[in-house]
Each structure stands twice: as C-alpha cells, then as structure tokens.
C-alpha cells in the first residue's frame, strides 16, 4: 500500500501563464473540503497536483493514500478499497484495513479513476454520500472522513454518457475539475524545465561543470510536440546529459528506441483512407491517390474538424489537435495561403 505521510509539498516548476493559472486554481480549491477531479494527458503531473492539493488543504497533517485503479480489479479492488474481515475469503487470516480507512481524516487519491468497475463505483458513491462502508465479509458499517481526489486522462462525461462511468458518481466527484495544461501549451516552460532537469542530473552524476544545451538543441526541444509531456522531457534531458561527452550538448535524442538494429514491427496498421473526416477513417488506403495528396487531405480534415469543434476559435482548435498555437498557425497558413 502506498501511503504518504505529512511532509513539505512537492515542487512544481513553471513560469508560463497556463502553469501559473493552474496553480492558482489548485491553491484556491485546496482549501475547500470537497472532492476534486484532476484531468490531464499522460506525463503532465496529475499525481504531483494531487499531492500539492492535499498538502495545501486543511487535511495536510492527515494521511495521503493513493491507489492506481487500473492495477486491480474485482474482489481484489474491493479489498484494497474497503478492507476485509478475517475469514472473508481464502487467505484472509486477519482483519485488514483498506485505503478508505487508512485515509481517514486525510485524502484518498484515486489515479486512473476511469478504470473503476461499475460495481466499485457504486460502493464509492455510498462512501461519498454517507461517509460509511462495509468491509469485505463484514456486517458492521465503518465510518470515515475522507476527501477524494480522482485523476484520469479520459473524458469522463463521455464515459458517463456511454454507461462506462456512473453519472451520479461523476456529479459527486466533480465539485471542481482541474485540467492540467499540457507542456506544449506552457510557453517558456520547456527551457526552464530543461535547465532544472539538466542541473539535477549533473549533480547526481557528480559532474563538475554545468550542462548547457546549444541553441540548436534548445530549439529542437522547444519545437518538439511532447506527447509524454513533462515526464518525457525529463527523460530526454537526463538521457542527453548522461550521454554527453562534454558540458555543451548539441544533440538531443527524442526516441530512445532509435537504432539501425531495431526490430521491424510485427504488423503495419491500416492507414486512414483519404477524403474523409477523422471519425470516418477505416479500411485500407487508396493507393490511387498520390502520397502528397493523401497527406494534404489528412491535414485538411484535421484542421476542418478541429475548427468546427472549436467554433473556429484557433487557439481552441490548436489545443484539440494537441499543437501549440504557433504550430497551428503555421499549418493553417500552409493550407490557406494569404492568412
């Protein structure tokens, strides 16, 4: 079981407007003793945000208990969440507290909350509403005082409409929803984080000289799309520092699997058919269409769909496509000369 006891809040580094606005929103809701959902792409720091939320709250002296909901299923998940009585099942030789009991007077962080089975969601809904539950194999209710913080990279309202997530539970947990900005939307933070991670890596390796990235290398870092966000950036920077033979680094390796000896993929997925919207893609590509024309049609379809979804707000369209605004503008001008 992963239980975090009171300590100083973990560091969160950034200076962009998007980052500072998120931290301000987090600090404001931390003082309100209500459930919170943290939404964000992989690698954006959702668990770090949950920890800061706990330590900035009135519960900071209580326990912070975490559970990855994707790691367990069925009866194992029930036992982890609610504990069990002796003899509840084979191997249950003694009473065991679950995460809710261990988080009493503190915070329970449910990571990957979208992966909760519906049966577990029903039981959690009861705890949220009444502050009570039964251990597995138990008949006497257990009272707890727990603040729930959930995190996911999935669109929960869509999950709820599809019947994969209970709408009642979503209503209870979404007192406030914090959306962590992806790294590509945090202008200027790539450079700041790069220097931070490089310095820490150099210290851990015992390097005597401060690592530096050449202008070309830094430009490559800032232009990268960062699908893995801060976690990916940390890996790329630390890998660059440890591989470098000198303090000034000119090369950045984004893909650690890159090798002339890399095994060929077992299969090649079907390419999207051209001339269709993204949601209509399927089947095999039309090889009668030149590749350049297929790529153009693909970009046009992405732009059109994103602009329609955002009601032609280009900044929102860029966010939908997971691009920076400047990247979006370059693509838009490429497809619409003169703009």
Image: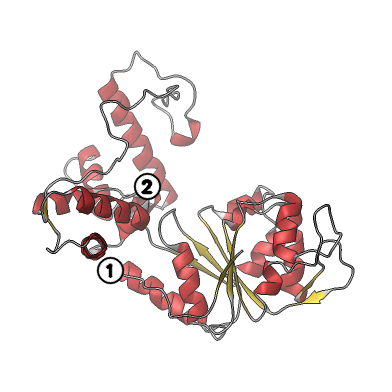
Tag 1 secondary structure: loop
Residue 16's disc is 1
Q: Position of residue 268 (x, y in %)?
A: 42, 22
Answer with left or right where residue 130 lies relative to residue 272: right
The residue singled out by tag 2 in the image is: 321
Tag 2 secondary structure: loop
Report which quarter residue 278 is drawn in: top left
Where 105 sits versus 86, above or below? below
Residue drawn at the location 52% of the way across and 84% of the way down: 31
Q: Position of residue 242 (x, y in %)?
A: 22, 51
Answer with left or right where residue 251 lies relative to residue 58: left
Residue 39's disc is none
What colouring style does the render use?
secondary structure
Where 240 sits versus 286, above or below? below
Within 10 Å of the Cα at label 1, are there few (<14), some (14-19), or many (20+) other Cα atoms? Answer: some
Residue drawn at the location 45% of the way across and 21% of the way down: 267
Q: Position of residue 77 (x, y in %)?
A: 70, 56
Comes first in the chain, label 1 or label 2: 1
Q: CA distance from mark 1 to mark 2?
A: 20 Å
Q: Nearer the viewer, mark 1 or mark 2?
A: 1
Q: Position of residue 321 (x, y in %)?
A: 37, 47
Image quadrant where one finds the N terminus: bottom right
Report which quarter residue 13 is drawn in: bottom left
Query: Is residue 119 visible in the rendered structure shown here?
Result: yes
Within 10 Å of the Cα at label 2, are there few (<14), some (14-19), or many (20+) other Cα atoms? Answer: some
Q: Closest to the observer: 293 or 193?
A: 193
Query: Is residue 29 visible in the rendered structure shown here?
Result: no
Do the residues under discs 1 and 2 have CB atoms within 8 angstroms?
Answer: no
Count of numbered circles in the view: 2
Q: Closest to the observer: 169 or 308?
A: 169
Q: Residue furthest top?
A: 288
Residue drawn at the location 41% of the way across and 53% of the way down: 310
């Amino acid at each position: 079981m992963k239980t975090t006891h009171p300590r100083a809040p973990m560091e969160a580094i950034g200076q962009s407007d998007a980052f500072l606005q998120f931290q301000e929103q987090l600090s404001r809701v931390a003082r309100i003793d209500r459930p919170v959902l943290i939404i964000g792409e992989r690698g954006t720091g959702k668990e770090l945000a949950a920890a800061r939320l706990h330590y900035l709250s009135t519960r900071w002296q209580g326990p912070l208990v975490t559970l990855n909901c994707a790691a367990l299923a069925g009866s194992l998940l029930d036992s982890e969440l609610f504990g069990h009585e002796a003899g509840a099942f084979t191997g249950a030789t003694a009473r065991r507290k679950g995460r809710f009991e261990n988080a009493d007077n503190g915070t329970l962080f449910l990571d990957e909350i979208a992966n909760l089975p519906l049966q577990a969601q029903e039981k959690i809904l009861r705890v949220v509403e009444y502050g009570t539950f039964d251990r597995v194999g138990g008949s006497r209710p257990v009272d707890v005082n727990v603040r729930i913080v959930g995190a996911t990279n999935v669109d929960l309202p869509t999950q709820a409409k599809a019947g994969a997530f209970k709408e009642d539970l979503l209503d209870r947990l979404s007192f406030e929803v914090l959306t962590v900005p992806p790294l590509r939307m945090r202008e200027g933070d790539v450079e700041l984080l790069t220097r931070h991670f490089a310095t820490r890596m150099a210290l851990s390796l015992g390097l005597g000289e401060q690592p530096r990235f050449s202008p070309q290398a830094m430009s490559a870092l800032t232009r990268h799309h960062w699908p893995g966000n801060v976690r990916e950036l940390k890996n790329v920077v630390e890998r660059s520092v440890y591989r470098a033979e000198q303090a000034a680094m000119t090369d950045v390796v984004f893909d650690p699997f890159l090798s002339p000896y890399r095994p060929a993929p077992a299969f090649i997925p079907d390419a999207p058919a051209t001339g269709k919207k993204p949601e209509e893609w399927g089947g095999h590509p039309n090889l009668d269409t030149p590749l350049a024309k297929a790529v153009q049609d693909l970009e046009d379809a992405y732009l059109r769909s994103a602009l329609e979804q955002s009601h032609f707000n280009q900044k929102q369209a860029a966010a939908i496509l997971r691009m920076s605004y400047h990247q979006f503008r370059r693509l838009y001008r490429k497809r619409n000369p003169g703009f």
